[in-house]
Amino acid sequence: MRATVLVRPKQGILDPQGEAVQGSLRKLGFDVSRVRVGRVLDVELAADGAEEARAQVERMCVELLANPLIESFEIQLEAE
């Protein structure tokens, strides 16, 4: 099973990387009102079905891949 995890700062949390990208885009002439920078993780895992895979990946996110205090995460599962 393959999981794609999108991790990004929660609403209201400062995002200095996003602000830097936004400023640079504006300097290049793009009319952008907001940019948030996150990261994408692709995880290959062994699981007996989508429910077990989702539970494993959620645990991975809470324990290591994301900081639940300041980051949110979205999980997308894809069967092989």
Image (spheres, helix red, strand yellow):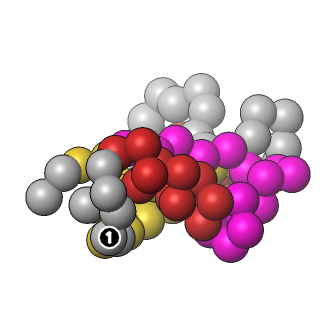
Q: Nearer the viewer, residue 40 or 37?
A: 40
Q: Amino acid at mark 1?
A: Ala
Q: Which residues are magenta?
A: 62-76
Tell me which corner region of the image, top left, top right, bottom left or bottom right, holds residue 63: bottom right
Answer with left or right where residue 20 lies relative to residue 32.
right
Measured as percent of width and height from the top left, residue 46 is found at 32, 70
Point out the image quarter for the N terminus: bottom left
The residue at the point 68 percent across, 72 percent down is: 64
Q: Secondary structure at mark 1?
A: loop
64 versus 22 height, above or below: below
Measured as percent of width and height from the top left, residue 60 is found at 60, 66
67 versus 28 height, above or below: below
The residue at the point 59 percent across, 27 percent down is: 33
The residue at the point 52 percent across, 60 percent down is: 56
Measured as percent of width and height from the top left, residue 37 is found at 58, 53
Measured as percent of width and height from the top left, residue 17 is found at 66, 60
Can you identify the residue that label 1 sits on? 46
Q: Is residue 54 visible?
A: yes
How many numbered badges does the structure rendering display?
1
Q: Residue furthest left?
A: 80
Point out the image quarter for the C terminus: bottom left
Answer with left or right where residue 60 lies relative to residue 49.
right
The residue at the point 42 percent across, 43 percent down is: 51
Tell me which corner region of the image, top left, top right, bottom left or bottom right, holds residue 66: bottom right
Q: Nearer the viewer, residue 13 or 21?
A: 13
